[in-house]
């Protein structure tokens, strides 16, 4: 909203952060205002006005600003005017960050930071790169957005194709971070997961005939449906095989199954649809023993041919173990050791531990669980992995 009004995305982001800091300092003492959103917008607008004026004085940008922005738009309006309308600029920011002048990786990283609110550490974890590398990518992306002078608006119909893939990837990563946080004390970040679902619904309203948009929404719904059963009373992680399936959200499952069933019948199948189909197989099984693992293995095989994602290969290895026995899965995991993206990832070692436990090698399984625990940044996951190791006598 501020970016649209002032035409400067990076400065708007900084102003909003300052407004949030001001709220954190003032509201506990003065009380929450009657209109918190209006208060934040007004404070951010004032901060931004001050920043812009400072920049104008220092860099002699006054003439440029006057030409580009009507003078009456520089004052902070009251909470009752346009700022209090129902316009939601989140999608506009989403598509702005996914501008084609950026590489897909930079666009996704910038959007996760600006729209998803993820930290640089969390984004680096998602991309499996060092935090310093990710910080540089985000900084360069902001500079390129500023230099492009791209208007703050939704893309035209001709521009959709160039940005949609990055937009969907961003929403996918935001949801994943919300459903299973890569760091922090909580396993879930419900605000992130539901914001990703909300935004994906909004994209689907704009593109109701896009099968991958529908597939992504179905995947989110089918995955989120299991969230109530993923943690115990103390917040401890409960794996899928041990979850109380009566706690799963039947309404979300029904909506997700109906959506992916209708979408798969319409035409070209993409990666999000295949992942949604895998989730549907899990969600429709009455118990873990009823899971159709051969179907899941086949779906991961198709997905692996479409995507260069090592996590897909990791999941396919587990599905192969569940279908053909742990030895088959362990052999496939051995082949993944050479992939640098997975070599030091805790999920590789956690999967190996699970399959070793299935094979009856308790000592090796315990060691792999401990290795996975050392590598994860999530306290709930670390606690689960160490508990498994202890149960095996490790």
Image: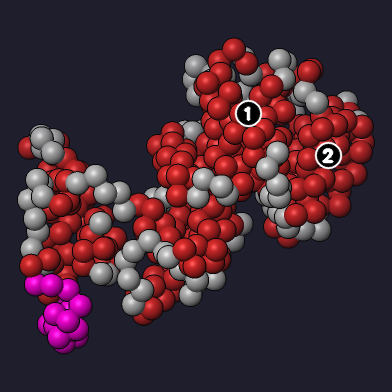
Q: Which mark is residue 393?
A: none
Q: Quadrant of residue 367?
A: top right
Q: Residues within 10 Å of mark 2 (few under 14, many from 20)?
A: some
- Per the image, the residue denoted by label 1 is 257
Q: Is residue 181 above or below residue 282?
A: below
Q: Quadrant of residue 66?
A: bottom left
Q: CA distance from mark 2 to mark 1?
A: 18 Å
Is residue 229 something one can see in this rendering?
no
**Residue ID at (23%, 60%):** 2
Helix, strand or loop for disc 2? helix
**Residue ID at (51%, 42%):** 175
**Residue ID at (57%, 58%):** 165
Asked if residue 252 lies left or right of residue 41, the reply is right
Asked if residue 134 lies left or right of residue 155, the reply is right
Is residue 117 something one can see in this rendering?
yes
Q: Is residue 202 magenta?
A: no
**Residue ID at (17%, 64%):** 48
Residue 375 location (% of width, % of height) = 63, 46
Residue 320 location (% of width, % of height) = 86, 36
Figure quadrant of the C terminus: top right
Q: Give, as a single range, the part of the protein colored magenta.
A: 54-71
Query: Observer-nearest residue: 9 or 315?
Result: 9
- Per the image, the residue denoted by label 2 is 298
Helix, strand or loop for disc 1? helix
């Amino acid at each position: 909203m501020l970016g649209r009004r002032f035409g400067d995305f990076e400065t708007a982001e900084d102003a909003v952060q300052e407004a949030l800091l001001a709220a954190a300092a003032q509201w506990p003492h003065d009380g929450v205002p009657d209109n918190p959103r209006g208060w934040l917008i007004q404070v951010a607008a004032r901060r931004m006005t001050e920043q812009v004026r400072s920049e104008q004085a220092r860099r002699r940008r006054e003439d440029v600003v006057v030409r580009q922005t009507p003078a009456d738009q520089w004052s902070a309006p009251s909470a009752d005017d346009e700022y209090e309308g129902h316009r939601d600029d989140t999608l506009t920011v989403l598509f702005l960050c996914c501008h084609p002048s950026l590489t897909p990786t930079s666009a996704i990283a910038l959007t996760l930071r600006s729209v998803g609110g993820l930290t640089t550490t969390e984004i680096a974890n998602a991309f499996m790169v060092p935090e310093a590398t990710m910080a540089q990518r985000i900084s360069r992306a902001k500079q390129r957005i500023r230099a492009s002078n791209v208007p703050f608006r939704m893309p035209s119909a001709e521009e959709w194709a160039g940005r949609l893939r990055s937009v969907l990837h961003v929403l996918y990563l935001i949801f994943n971070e919300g459903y299973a946080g890569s760091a922090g004390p909580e396993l879930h970040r419900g605000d992130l997961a539901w914001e990703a679902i909300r935004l994906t619904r909004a994209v689907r309203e704009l593109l109701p005939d896009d099968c991958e948009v529908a597939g992504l929404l179905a995947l989110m719904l089918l995955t989120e449906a299991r969230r109530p059963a993923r943690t115990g009373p103390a917040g401890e992680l409960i794996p899928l095989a041990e979850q109380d399936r009566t706690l799963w959200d039947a309404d979300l499952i029904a909506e997700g199954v109906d959506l992916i069933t209708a979408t798969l019948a319409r035409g070209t199948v993409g990666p999000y649809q295949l992942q949604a189909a895998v989730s549907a197989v899990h969600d429709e099984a009455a118990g873990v023993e009823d899971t159709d693992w051969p179907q899941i293995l086949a779906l991961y095989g198709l997905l692996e041919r479409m995507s260069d994602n090592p996590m897909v290969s990791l999941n396919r290895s587990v599905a192969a173990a569940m279908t053909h026995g742990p030895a088959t899965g362990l052999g496939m995991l051995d082949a993944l050791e050479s992939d640098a993206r997975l070599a030091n990832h805790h999920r590789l070692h956690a999967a190996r531990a699970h399959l070793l436990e299935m094979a009856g090698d308790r000592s090796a399984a315990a060691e792999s669980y401990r290795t996975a625990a050392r590598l994860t940044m999530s306290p709930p996951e670390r606690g689960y992995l160490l508990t498994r190791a202890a149960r095996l006598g490790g």
